[in-house]
Image (spheres, coloured by chain):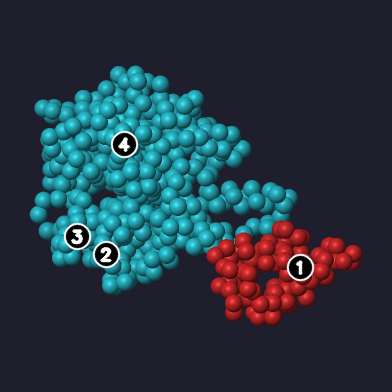
Protein backbone atom coordinates (compact mmCIF):
# COMPACT_ATOMS: atom_id res chain seq x y z
CA UNK A 1 0.00 0.00 0.00
CA UNK A 2 1.42 3.35 -1.07
CA UNK A 3 0.41 6.66 0.43
CA UNK A 4 -1.21 7.64 -2.87
CA UNK A 5 -3.21 4.42 -2.93
CA UNK A 6 -4.23 5.05 0.67
CA UNK A 7 -5.39 8.57 -0.22
CA UNK A 8 -7.52 7.12 -3.01
CA UNK A 9 -9.20 4.71 -0.60
CA UNK A 10 -9.92 7.54 1.82
CA UNK A 11 -11.39 9.65 -1.01
CA UNK A 12 -13.53 6.69 -2.04
CA UNK A 13 -14.96 6.61 1.47
CA UNK A 14 -15.48 10.38 1.61
CA UNK A 15 -17.29 10.29 -1.72
CA UNK A 16 -19.86 7.98 -0.13
CA UNK A 17 -20.03 9.89 3.16
CA UNK A 18 -20.35 13.31 1.49
CA UNK A 19 -21.91 12.52 -1.91
CA UNK A 20 -22.77 16.14 -2.69
CA UNK A 21 -19.16 17.31 -2.48
CA UNK A 22 -16.79 17.84 -5.42
CA UNK A 23 -13.65 16.00 -4.41
CA UNK A 24 -11.69 16.62 -7.61
CA UNK A 25 -9.79 19.62 -6.24
CA UNK A 26 -9.16 18.42 -2.73
CA UNK A 27 -5.89 19.72 -1.27
CA UNK A 28 -4.02 17.04 0.70
CA UNK A 29 -2.37 19.41 3.18
CA UNK A 30 -5.53 21.37 4.06
CA UNK A 31 -7.87 20.15 6.82
CA UNK A 32 -10.75 18.23 5.31
CA UNK A 33 -13.26 20.20 7.41
CA UNK A 34 -11.89 23.45 5.99
CA UNK A 35 -12.59 22.44 2.39
CA UNK A 36 -15.57 20.09 2.68
CA UNK A 37 -18.84 20.14 4.58
CA UNK A 38 -17.94 17.43 7.07
CA UNK A 39 -19.07 17.31 10.68
CA UNK A 40 -18.17 15.08 13.62
CA UNK A 41 -20.81 12.51 12.64
CA UNK A 42 -19.23 12.27 9.19
CA UNK A 43 -15.85 11.52 10.74
CA UNK A 44 -17.50 8.73 12.73
CA UNK A 45 -18.78 7.42 9.39
CA UNK A 46 -15.25 7.52 7.98
CA UNK A 47 -13.98 5.58 11.01
CA UNK A 48 -16.78 3.04 10.55
CA UNK A 49 -16.06 2.57 6.85
CA UNK A 50 -12.34 2.07 7.52
CA UNK A 51 -13.38 -0.64 9.98
CA UNK A 52 -15.90 -2.26 7.61
CA UNK A 53 -14.00 -2.06 4.33
CA UNK A 54 -10.41 -2.46 5.49
CA UNK A 55 -10.50 -3.88 9.00
CA UNK A 56 -8.68 -0.83 10.32
CA UNK A 57 -9.41 0.45 13.82
CA UNK A 58 -8.91 4.11 14.60
CA UNK A 59 -9.05 4.70 18.37
CA UNK A 60 -10.78 7.90 19.48
CA UNK A 61 -7.48 9.29 20.72
CA UNK A 62 -6.15 9.10 17.15
CA UNK A 63 -9.05 10.86 15.39
CA UNK A 64 -6.83 13.92 15.00
CA UNK A 65 -4.75 12.00 12.48
CA UNK A 66 -7.72 12.04 10.10
CA UNK A 67 -7.67 15.84 9.85
CA UNK A 68 -6.26 16.12 6.32
CA UNK A 69 -5.81 13.74 3.42
CA UNK A 70 -2.04 13.87 3.96
CA UNK A 71 -2.29 13.11 7.67
CA UNK A 72 -4.75 10.31 6.89
CA UNK A 73 -2.21 8.75 4.52
CA UNK A 74 0.65 9.13 7.04
CA UNK A 75 -1.40 7.50 9.76
CA UNK A 76 -3.35 4.87 7.83
CA UNK A 77 -0.88 3.56 5.24
CA UNK A 78 1.11 1.42 7.75
CA UNK A 79 -2.16 0.03 9.10
CA UNK A 80 -3.22 -1.69 5.89
CA UNK A 81 -2.71 -5.46 6.06
CA UNK A 82 -0.39 -5.47 3.04
CA UNK A 83 1.72 -2.55 4.32
CA UNK A 84 4.74 -4.79 4.87
CA UNK A 85 4.68 -5.87 1.23
CA UNK A 86 4.27 -2.36 -0.15
CA UNK B 1 -67.75 28.00 23.31
CA UNK B 2 -67.31 29.16 19.72
CA UNK B 3 -64.36 27.39 18.16
CA UNK B 4 -62.11 28.73 15.45
CA UNK B 5 -62.91 27.30 12.04
CA UNK B 6 -60.00 25.31 10.61
CA UNK B 7 -59.43 24.93 6.88
CA UNK B 8 -57.16 22.98 4.56
CA UNK B 9 -55.10 25.34 2.42
CA UNK B 10 -52.54 23.05 0.80
CA UNK B 11 -51.47 19.47 0.45
CA UNK B 12 -48.60 17.37 -0.79
CA UNK B 13 -48.62 13.64 -1.27
CA UNK B 14 -46.88 10.61 -2.58
CA UNK B 15 -48.85 7.42 -3.15
CA UNK B 16 -48.00 4.20 -4.98
CA UNK B 17 -50.03 5.50 -7.94
CA UNK B 18 -49.26 9.21 -7.87
CA UNK B 19 -46.85 11.85 -6.66
CA UNK B 20 -49.25 14.78 -6.92
CA UNK B 21 -52.92 15.15 -6.09
CA UNK B 22 -53.74 15.57 -9.78
CA UNK B 23 -51.95 12.36 -10.76
CA UNK B 24 -53.37 10.45 -7.79
CA UNK B 25 -56.92 11.58 -8.54
CA UNK B 26 -56.57 10.84 -12.24
CA UNK B 27 -55.51 7.28 -11.47
CA UNK B 28 -58.26 6.80 -8.89
CA UNK B 29 -60.86 7.77 -11.45
CA UNK B 30 -59.25 5.66 -14.19
CA UNK B 31 -58.96 2.53 -12.03
CA UNK B 32 -55.15 2.48 -12.05
CA UNK B 33 -53.62 0.45 -9.24
CA UNK B 34 -50.18 1.31 -7.86
CA UNK B 35 -49.39 -2.12 -6.48
CA UNK B 36 -46.37 -4.06 -7.68
CA UNK B 37 -44.21 -6.76 -6.13
CA UNK B 38 -41.01 -6.29 -4.16
CA UNK B 39 -38.35 -8.53 -2.66
CA UNK B 40 -38.96 -8.69 1.05
CA UNK B 41 -35.88 -9.65 3.07
CA UNK B 42 -35.98 -13.36 4.00
CA UNK B 43 -39.46 -13.73 2.45
CA UNK B 44 -39.18 -13.42 -1.33
CA UNK B 45 -41.54 -11.46 -3.53
CA UNK B 46 -44.77 -10.01 -2.20
CA UNK B 47 -47.28 -7.44 -3.40
CA UNK B 48 -46.51 -3.96 -2.08
CA UNK B 49 -47.12 -0.33 -2.89
CA UNK B 50 -43.97 1.74 -3.48
CA UNK B 51 -43.70 5.45 -4.22
CA UNK B 52 -41.67 6.89 -7.08
CA UNK B 53 -41.12 10.51 -6.00
CA UNK B 54 -37.59 11.89 -6.30
CA UNK B 55 -36.13 12.51 -2.82
CA UNK B 56 -33.43 14.71 -4.34
CA UNK B 57 -36.06 17.25 -5.35
CA UNK B 58 -35.87 18.64 -1.82
CA UNK B 59 -32.93 16.92 -0.12
CA UNK B 60 -29.18 16.66 -0.59
CA UNK B 61 -27.76 13.20 -1.21
CA UNK B 62 -26.07 13.33 2.17
CA UNK B 63 -29.36 14.04 3.96
CA UNK B 64 -30.98 11.11 2.17
CA UNK B 65 -28.07 8.90 3.28
CA UNK B 66 -28.22 9.96 6.91
CA UNK B 67 -31.98 10.18 7.24
CA UNK B 68 -34.75 7.63 6.86
CA UNK B 69 -37.11 6.69 4.06
CA UNK B 70 -40.03 8.08 6.01
CA UNK B 71 -38.04 11.25 6.55
CA UNK B 72 -37.67 11.64 2.79
CA UNK B 73 -41.37 10.91 2.25
CA UNK B 74 -42.26 13.50 4.89
CA UNK B 75 -39.98 16.18 3.48
CA UNK B 76 -41.28 15.64 -0.04
CA UNK B 77 -44.91 15.89 1.10
CA UNK B 78 -44.31 18.88 3.37
CA UNK B 79 -42.44 20.81 0.68
CA UNK B 80 -45.13 20.04 -1.89
CA UNK B 81 -47.82 21.13 0.59
CA UNK B 82 -45.95 24.35 1.32
CA UNK B 83 -45.67 25.17 -2.37
CA UNK B 84 -49.34 24.33 -2.85
CA UNK B 85 -50.36 26.59 0.03
CA UNK B 86 -48.62 29.59 -1.49
CA UNK B 87 -47.16 30.55 1.88
CA UNK B 88 -43.75 32.24 1.93
CA UNK B 89 -42.12 30.48 4.85
CA UNK B 90 -39.34 33.03 5.13
CA UNK B 91 -41.89 35.73 5.90
CA UNK B 92 -43.46 33.71 8.71
CA UNK B 93 -42.56 33.27 12.38
CA UNK B 94 -41.23 29.73 12.19
CA UNK B 95 -41.61 29.25 15.94
CA UNK B 96 -45.39 29.49 15.45
CA UNK B 97 -45.57 26.63 12.94
CA UNK B 98 -46.32 23.07 14.06
CA UNK B 99 -45.55 19.73 12.40
CA UNK B 100 -47.82 16.86 13.44
CA UNK B 101 -47.40 13.58 11.59
CA UNK B 102 -49.28 10.37 12.22
CA UNK B 103 -47.30 7.13 12.17
CA UNK B 104 -48.30 3.52 12.56
CA UNK B 105 -44.85 2.44 13.71
CA UNK B 106 -41.31 3.67 13.41
CA UNK B 107 -37.84 2.24 13.88
CA UNK B 108 -38.50 -1.27 12.62
CA UNK B 109 -36.90 -0.56 9.24
CA UNK B 110 -33.76 1.00 10.64
CA UNK B 111 -33.34 -1.61 13.37
CA UNK B 112 -33.79 -4.52 10.95
CA UNK B 113 -31.26 -2.93 8.59
CA UNK B 114 -28.67 -2.68 11.35
CA UNK B 115 -29.27 -6.20 12.61
CA UNK B 116 -28.78 -7.40 9.04
CA UNK B 117 -25.68 -5.20 8.73
CA UNK B 118 -23.98 -6.64 11.82
CA UNK B 119 -24.96 -10.14 10.72
CA UNK B 120 -22.40 -9.59 7.94
CA UNK B 121 -19.80 -9.04 10.68
CA UNK B 122 -20.58 -11.98 12.95
CA UNK B 123 -22.95 -9.85 15.01
CA UNK B 124 -20.12 -7.70 16.33
CA UNK B 125 -21.91 -4.57 17.60
CA UNK B 126 -18.95 -2.32 16.91
CA UNK B 127 -20.30 -2.32 13.33
CA UNK B 128 -23.66 -0.88 14.50
CA UNK B 129 -24.13 2.63 13.08
CA UNK B 130 -24.05 5.74 15.23
CA UNK B 131 -26.98 6.96 13.10
CA UNK B 132 -29.25 4.36 14.70
CA UNK B 133 -30.71 6.51 17.47
CA UNK B 134 -31.60 9.65 15.47
CA UNK B 135 -33.06 7.38 12.79
CA UNK B 136 -35.23 5.42 15.21
CA UNK B 137 -36.54 8.01 17.66
CA UNK B 138 -40.30 8.16 17.32
CA UNK B 139 -40.26 11.82 16.23
CA UNK B 140 -37.90 11.10 13.31
CA UNK B 141 -40.32 11.90 10.48
CA UNK B 142 -41.44 15.25 11.91
CA UNK B 143 -37.91 16.09 13.03
CA UNK B 144 -36.51 15.64 9.54
CA UNK B 145 -39.16 18.04 8.19
CA UNK B 146 -38.23 20.55 10.90
CA UNK B 147 -34.55 20.30 9.92
CA UNK B 148 -35.29 20.60 6.22
CA UNK B 149 -37.61 23.60 6.50
CA UNK B 150 -35.95 25.29 9.48
CA UNK B 151 -39.21 25.25 11.41
CA UNK B 152 -38.65 25.80 15.14
CA UNK B 153 -42.17 25.22 16.47
CA UNK B 154 -43.42 21.90 17.85
CA UNK B 155 -42.59 18.97 15.54
CA UNK B 156 -43.55 15.48 16.59
CA UNK B 157 -45.30 12.34 15.52
CA UNK B 158 -48.52 10.80 16.74
CA UNK B 159 -48.43 7.04 17.14
CA UNK B 160 -51.91 5.71 16.50
CA UNK B 161 -51.46 2.53 14.45
CA UNK B 162 -53.42 2.78 11.22
CA UNK B 163 -55.73 5.48 12.59
CA UNK B 164 -52.75 7.83 12.62
CA UNK B 165 -53.26 9.69 9.33
CA UNK B 166 -56.54 11.17 10.51
CA UNK B 167 -54.95 11.84 13.89
CA UNK B 168 -52.35 14.14 12.38
CA UNK B 169 -55.09 16.43 11.04
CA UNK B 170 -57.21 16.19 14.16
CA UNK B 171 -54.29 17.05 16.43
CA UNK B 172 -53.26 19.97 14.23
CA UNK B 173 -56.80 21.35 14.28
CA UNK B 174 -56.79 21.12 18.07
CA UNK B 175 -53.43 22.90 18.35
CA UNK B 176 -54.61 25.68 16.02
CA UNK B 177 -57.79 26.12 18.06
CA UNK B 178 -55.77 26.25 21.26
CA UNK B 179 -53.64 28.99 19.74
CA UNK B 180 -50.46 26.93 20.19
CA UNK B 181 -49.47 27.51 16.55
CA UNK B 182 -50.61 29.68 13.65
CA UNK B 183 -49.90 27.29 10.80
CA UNK B 184 -49.61 23.52 10.76
CA UNK B 185 -48.16 20.80 8.59
CA UNK B 186 -50.07 17.63 9.39
CA UNK B 187 -51.07 14.25 8.06
CA UNK B 188 -49.58 10.80 7.99
CA UNK B 189 -46.55 8.98 6.64
CA UNK B 190 -45.25 5.43 6.31
CA UNK B 191 -42.15 3.53 5.22
CA UNK B 192 -43.56 0.16 6.28
CA UNK B 193 -42.73 -1.94 3.17
CA UNK B 194 -39.04 -1.59 4.04
CA UNK B 195 -39.49 -3.82 7.11
CA UNK B 196 -39.87 -7.56 6.66
CA UNK B 197 -41.31 -7.78 10.18
CA UNK B 198 -44.61 -6.24 9.23
CA UNK B 199 -44.96 -8.65 6.28
CA UNK B 200 -44.00 -11.64 8.43
CA UNK B 201 -46.31 -10.54 11.23
CA UNK B 202 -49.33 -10.23 8.94
CA UNK B 203 -48.43 -13.51 7.23
CA UNK B 204 -48.31 -15.32 10.56
CA UNK B 205 -51.67 -13.74 11.33
CA UNK B 206 -53.01 -15.09 7.99
CA UNK B 207 -53.68 -11.50 7.00
CA UNK B 208 -51.12 -10.87 4.23
CA UNK B 209 -52.52 -10.55 0.70
CA UNK B 210 -51.55 -13.12 -1.90
CA UNK B 211 -52.46 -12.86 -5.60
CA UNK B 212 -50.74 -13.78 -8.86
CA UNK B 213 -51.48 -10.27 -10.17
CA UNK B 214 -50.28 -7.70 -7.63
CA UNK B 215 -52.73 -5.09 -8.95
CA UNK B 216 -55.55 -7.42 -7.89
CA UNK B 217 -54.14 -8.26 -4.45
CA UNK B 218 -55.87 -5.47 -2.53
CA UNK B 219 -59.57 -6.16 -2.95
CA UNK B 220 -61.72 -4.91 -0.08
CA UNK B 221 -65.30 -6.22 -0.08
CA UNK B 222 -64.56 -8.89 -2.70
CA UNK B 223 -65.32 -12.44 -1.66
CA UNK B 224 -61.80 -13.58 -2.66
CA UNK B 225 -59.94 -11.02 -0.54
CA UNK B 226 -57.29 -12.63 1.59
CA UNK B 227 -55.35 -9.92 3.34
CA UNK B 228 -53.48 -6.65 3.43
CA UNK B 229 -51.09 -5.21 0.83
CA UNK B 230 -48.42 -3.25 2.67
CA UNK B 231 -47.57 0.10 1.13
CA UNK B 232 -45.58 3.22 1.75
CA UNK B 233 -46.79 6.74 1.25
CA UNK B 234 -47.39 10.11 2.75
CA UNK B 235 -49.82 12.96 2.70
CA UNK B 236 -49.24 16.25 4.48
CA UNK B 237 -51.72 19.12 4.62
CA UNK B 238 -51.33 22.73 5.60
CA UNK B 239 -54.02 23.77 8.05
CA UNK B 240 -54.87 27.29 9.16
CA UNK B 241 -57.52 29.12 11.08
CA UNK B 242 -60.11 30.39 8.62
CA UNK B 243 -59.51 34.06 9.40
CA UNK B 244 -55.79 33.66 8.64
CA UNK B 245 -56.48 31.80 5.42
CA UNK B 246 -58.96 34.40 4.24
CA UNK B 247 -56.65 37.26 5.17
CA UNK B 248 -53.99 35.99 2.81
CA UNK B 249 -56.42 34.94 0.09
CA UNK B 250 -55.59 31.25 0.36
CA UNK B 251 -57.19 28.59 -1.75
CA UNK B 252 -59.37 26.48 0.56
CA UNK B 253 -59.79 22.76 -0.16
CA UNK B 254 -62.30 22.17 2.61
CA UNK B 255 -63.08 22.75 6.26
CA UNK B 256 -62.47 20.45 9.22
CA UNK B 257 -66.09 19.89 10.20
CA UNK B 258 -65.69 17.39 13.02
CA UNK B 259 -64.00 14.29 14.28
CA UNK B 260 -63.90 11.59 16.89
CA UNK B 261 -61.19 9.35 18.28
CA UNK B 262 -62.10 6.47 20.55
CA UNK B 263 -60.90 3.01 21.57
CA UNK B 264 -62.43 -0.45 21.39
CA UNK B 265 -60.84 -1.69 24.63
CA UNK B 266 -61.67 -5.23 23.52
CA UNK B 267 -58.80 -6.84 21.57
CA UNK B 268 -55.24 -6.38 20.32
CA UNK B 269 -56.13 -6.84 16.65
CA UNK B 270 -59.82 -7.65 16.15
CA UNK B 271 -61.95 -4.58 15.45
CA UNK B 272 -65.12 -3.83 17.35
CA UNK B 273 -67.97 -2.62 15.11
CA UNK B 274 -69.91 -1.25 18.07
CA UNK B 275 -67.08 1.15 18.97
CA UNK B 276 -66.44 1.96 15.29
CA UNK B 277 -70.11 2.91 14.86
CA UNK B 278 -69.88 5.00 18.02
CA UNK B 279 -66.82 6.77 16.60
CA UNK B 280 -68.63 7.60 13.36
CA UNK B 281 -71.77 8.80 15.17
CA UNK B 282 -69.79 10.99 17.55
CA UNK B 283 -67.82 12.51 14.67
CA UNK B 284 -71.07 13.39 12.88
CA UNK B 285 -72.41 14.98 16.07
CA UNK B 286 -69.11 16.79 16.65
CA UNK B 287 -69.44 18.27 13.17
CA UNK B 288 -72.91 19.56 14.00
CA UNK B 289 -74.33 17.38 11.26
CA UNK B 290 -76.71 14.44 11.00
CA UNK B 291 -76.08 11.20 9.13
CA UNK B 292 -78.33 12.58 6.39
CA UNK B 293 -75.69 15.24 5.70
CA UNK B 294 -72.87 12.81 4.88
CA UNK B 295 -72.47 12.45 1.12
CA UNK B 296 -69.38 10.26 0.84
CA UNK B 297 -67.92 7.67 3.20
CA UNK B 298 -64.34 6.58 2.58
CA UNK B 299 -63.89 3.28 4.34
CA UNK B 300 -60.86 2.00 6.19
CA UNK B 301 -61.40 -1.60 4.97
CA UNK B 302 -58.02 -3.28 4.48
CA UNK B 303 -59.04 -6.34 2.46
CA UNK B 304 -58.97 -8.75 5.37
CA UNK B 305 -61.78 -11.32 5.52
CA UNK B 306 -63.03 -10.29 8.96
CA UNK B 307 -62.09 -6.61 9.24
CA UNK B 308 -64.01 -5.53 6.14
CA UNK B 309 -67.19 -7.15 7.42
CA UNK B 310 -66.84 -5.52 10.82
CA UNK B 311 -66.58 -2.05 9.30
CA UNK B 312 -69.55 -2.74 7.03
CA UNK B 313 -71.57 -3.75 10.09
CA UNK B 314 -70.63 -0.45 11.75
CA UNK B 315 -71.46 1.67 8.69
CA UNK B 316 -74.73 -0.13 8.07
CA UNK B 317 -75.75 0.45 11.66
CA UNK B 318 -74.96 4.19 11.56
CA UNK B 319 -76.59 4.94 8.22
CA UNK B 320 -79.57 2.58 8.57
CA UNK B 321 -82.81 4.38 7.87
CA UNK B 322 -81.43 6.97 5.52
CA UNK B 323 -83.68 7.57 2.59
CA UNK B 324 -80.76 7.43 0.16
CA UNK B 325 -77.43 5.99 1.24
CA UNK B 326 -74.19 7.99 1.05
CA UNK B 327 -71.71 7.01 -1.63
CA UNK B 328 -69.23 4.56 -0.06
CA UNK B 329 -65.79 3.79 -1.48
CA UNK B 330 -62.35 2.45 -0.60
CA UNK B 331 -58.96 3.75 -1.68
CA UNK B 332 -56.83 0.83 -0.45
CA UNK B 333 -58.05 -1.19 -3.42
CA UNK B 334 -55.73 1.02 -5.53
CA UNK B 335 -52.79 1.69 -3.21
CA UNK B 336 -52.86 -1.03 -0.57
CA UNK B 337 -52.58 -0.13 3.07
CA UNK B 338 -50.27 2.85 3.50
CA UNK B 339 -50.44 2.42 7.26
CA UNK B 340 -49.75 5.72 9.02
CA UNK B 341 -50.41 7.60 5.80
CA UNK B 342 -53.69 5.83 5.04
CA UNK B 343 -56.20 8.20 6.61
CA UNK B 344 -54.53 11.31 5.22
CA UNK B 345 -53.90 9.90 1.72
CA UNK B 346 -57.33 8.39 1.33
CA UNK B 347 -58.94 11.67 2.34
CA UNK B 348 -56.84 13.50 -0.24
CA UNK B 349 -57.97 11.14 -2.97
CA UNK B 350 -61.56 12.12 -2.25
CA UNK B 351 -61.29 15.88 -1.68
CA UNK B 352 -61.56 16.66 -5.40
CA UNK B 353 -65.10 15.26 -5.26
CA UNK B 354 -66.25 18.61 -3.91
CA UNK B 355 -65.46 20.09 -7.32
CA UNK B 356 -65.53 17.31 -9.92
CA UNK B 357 -68.65 15.67 -8.44
CA UNK B 358 -67.25 12.20 -9.04
CA UNK B 359 -66.79 9.45 -6.48
CA UNK B 360 -63.84 7.21 -7.16
CA UNK B 361 -64.70 3.51 -6.99
CA UNK B 362 -63.47 0.55 -5.03
CA UNK B 363 -61.70 -1.54 -7.64
CA UNK B 364 -61.10 -5.30 -7.83
CA UNK B 365 -64.60 -6.21 -6.69
CA UNK B 366 -65.38 -9.06 -9.07
CA UNK B 367 -67.58 -10.97 -6.64
CA UNK B 368 -69.04 -8.76 -3.93
CA UNK B 369 -69.12 -10.41 -0.53
CA UNK B 370 -72.80 -10.39 0.51
CA UNK B 371 -71.68 -9.48 4.02
CA UNK B 372 -70.10 -6.30 2.60
CA UNK B 373 -73.01 -5.40 0.34
CA UNK B 374 -73.68 -1.93 1.70
CA UNK B 375 -76.18 0.26 -0.13
CA UNK B 376 -74.23 3.08 -1.72
CA UNK B 377 -71.03 1.15 -2.48
CA UNK B 378 -69.27 2.53 -5.54
CA UNK B 379 -67.73 -0.45 -7.29
CA UNK B 380 -65.21 -0.64 -10.15
CA UNK B 381 -66.34 2.52 -11.97
CA UNK B 382 -66.58 6.13 -10.77
CA UNK B 383 -70.01 7.47 -9.99
CA UNK B 384 -71.21 10.94 -10.89
CA UNK B 385 -73.14 12.65 -8.13
CA UNK B 386 -75.13 15.86 -7.96
CA UNK B 387 -73.42 17.31 -4.93
CA UNK B 388 -70.81 16.50 -2.30
CA UNK B 389 -70.90 18.68 0.80
CA UNK B 390 -69.47 16.39 3.48
CA UNK B 391 -66.86 13.61 3.27
CA UNK B 392 -66.51 11.18 6.16
CA UNK B 393 -63.16 9.41 6.41
CA UNK B 394 -62.62 6.34 8.60
CA UNK B 395 -59.26 5.12 9.81
CA UNK B 396 -58.93 2.37 12.38
CA UNK B 397 -55.94 0.66 13.95
CA UNK B 398 -54.58 -2.11 16.10
CA UNK B 399 -55.09 -2.05 19.85
CA UNK B 400 -58.56 -0.82 18.96
CA UNK B 401 -57.98 2.82 18.10
CA UNK B 402 -60.61 4.40 15.83
CA UNK B 403 -60.61 7.77 14.15
CA UNK B 404 -63.26 9.42 12.01
CA UNK B 405 -62.70 12.77 10.36
CA UNK B 406 -65.32 14.79 8.49
CA UNK B 407 -64.39 17.45 5.94
CA UNK B 408 -67.07 19.71 4.56
CA UNK B 409 -67.20 21.90 1.50
CA UNK B 410 -66.00 25.37 2.43
CA UNK B 411 -68.78 27.90 2.49
CA UNK B 412 -67.88 31.35 3.77
Structural crowding at the residue carrying mark 4, measured as other residues with C-alpha within 10 Å and reported as few (<14), some (14–19) or many (≥20): many
Closest to the observer, A29 or B40: A29
Q: Is residue B110 above or below residue B270?
A: below
Chain containing mark 1: A
Label 2 with label 3: CB-CB less than 8 Å: yes
Calculate the distance from the C-alpha at mark 2 to the C-alpha at mark 3: 9 Å
Percent x, y of residue B225: 40, 25
Calculate the distance from the C-alpha at mark 1 to the C-alpha at mark 2: 50 Å
Q: Is residue A71 visible?
A: yes
For label 4, the SS is helix
Calculate the distance from the C-alpha at mark 3 to the C-alpha at mark 1: 58 Å
Calculate the distance from the C-alpha at mark 1 to the C-alpha at mark 4: 55 Å
Residue B409 appears left or right of B369: left
User: At 11% from the left edge and 51% from the top edge, which residue is drawn?
Assistant: B411
From the viewer's perspective, is the residue at label 3 or at label 1 nearer?
Answer: 1
Residue B227 appears left or right of B21: right
Calculate the distance from the C-alpha at mark 3 to the C-alpha at mark 4: 26 Å
Q: Which residue is mark 1?
A: A6
- Which chain wears red? A
For label 2, the SS is loop
Q: Which residue is mark 2?
A: B87
From the viewer's perspective, is the residue at label 1 or at label 2 nearer?
Answer: 1
Amino acid sequence: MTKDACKKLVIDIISDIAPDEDLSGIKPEIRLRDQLQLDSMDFLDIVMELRKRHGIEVPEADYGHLASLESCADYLTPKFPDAAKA
Amino acid sequence: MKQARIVITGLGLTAPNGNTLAEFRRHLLAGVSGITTIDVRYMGRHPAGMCTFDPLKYQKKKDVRIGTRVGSISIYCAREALADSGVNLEARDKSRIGIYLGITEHGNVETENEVFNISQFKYDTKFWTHHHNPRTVANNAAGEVSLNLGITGPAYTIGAACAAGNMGLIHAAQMLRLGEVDFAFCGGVSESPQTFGIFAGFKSQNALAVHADPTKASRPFDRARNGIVISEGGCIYTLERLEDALARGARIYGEIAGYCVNSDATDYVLPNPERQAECVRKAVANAGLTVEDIDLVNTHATSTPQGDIQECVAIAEVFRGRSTPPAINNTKSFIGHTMGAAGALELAGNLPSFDDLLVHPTINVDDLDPQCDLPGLVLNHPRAVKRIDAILNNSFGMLGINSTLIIKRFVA
